[in-house]
Amino acid sequence: MTDETPQASPDPEPVADESLQLGLERIVFFSDAVFAIAITLLALEIRLPEGDFSDNAALTRALLAMWPKYLAFGISFWVIASFWLGHHRMFLRIKRFDRRLILLNFVLLMLIAFIPFPTTLISEYGNRTASIFYASTMVAIGLTLAAMTVYAAGPGHLVDETVGSIWRQRGLWRSLAVAGVFALSIVIAFFSADLAMYSWLLLAPVSFLGRDHSHG
């Protein structure tokens, strides 16, 4: 008579949990690296024009004339930092991941890595086309981050079970508020490119609205 008693097998759950945690850590580490590289590239785009600046007065004039580059750098630095903060807050709550989340994250990182190029455009030209191109890139990033929040807390069921609708609403507000500021600037750019760029300063008060004072 054959012994049909099932053989004991190791419990795979700890291994699964460990692999899942490792996978999430790799996603976060890779994402952080892309954000950091994008911010670093912003500074590398600030260069003096061709010429002889051995004279103190000439160098001073050249440095002062580069103020559009400083402004573009500062705006892009804080925009990337804002997007990183939103990404960081999201992954503090995400406990699982799937292919769709990874795909959305890659789209986000692709756009983040692209930011130095439109930043160079607005610092060198500053016209309507450059402003609209820059703002359109930021709108796309904001909408992608919002889509990740909706998916993770909705159909994907990837967040911590304790996370409620308030967390999703706050995440959406942060992403859509930034996208909204840049979308508004696209309209303004048709009347004044300079005014459109200055409207991006609205990002400062927007970043303080709807903040989550709890952990993450």
Image (cartoon, rainbow, N blue to C red):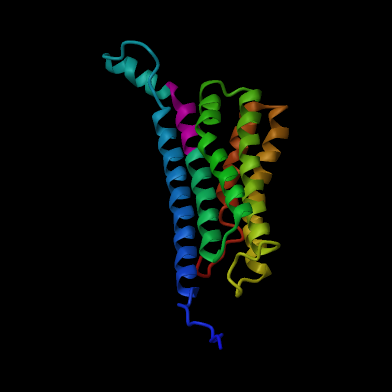
Foreground: 79 or 192? 79
| Residue with the most extreme bottom position | 1
What secondary structure is the stretch in magenta mostly built from?
helix
> Is 69 displayed left or right of 194 in the figure?
left
Q: Position of residue 94 (x, y in %)?
A: 56, 64
Foreground: 139 or 199? 139
Q: Position of residue 40 (x, y in %)?
A: 40, 37
| Residue with the most extreme top position | 51
Q: Position of residue 29 (x, y in %)?
A: 43, 52
| Residue with the most extreme front position | 1
Foreground: 24 or 172? 24
Q: Position of residue 167 (x, y in %)?
A: 62, 66
> Which of the image's four quarters has the N terminus?
bottom right
What range is drawn magenta here?
65-74
Q: Say above or below: 33 vs 42.
A: below
Q: Which quarter of the figure has residue 18? A: bottom left
> Is 14 displayed left or right of 96 in the figure?
left
State the count of labels: 0
Foreground: 62 or 51? 51
- 102 in the magenta segment: no
* Residue occupying image coordinates x 65% and y 64%: 153
Q: Say above or below: 103 vs 200.
A: below
> Is 157 displayed left or right of 116 in the figure?
right
* Residue occupying image coordinates x 66% and y 56%: 173
Q: Say above or below: 212 vs 35.
A: below
Q: Which quarter of the figure has residue 44? A: top left
- 73 in the magenta segment: yes
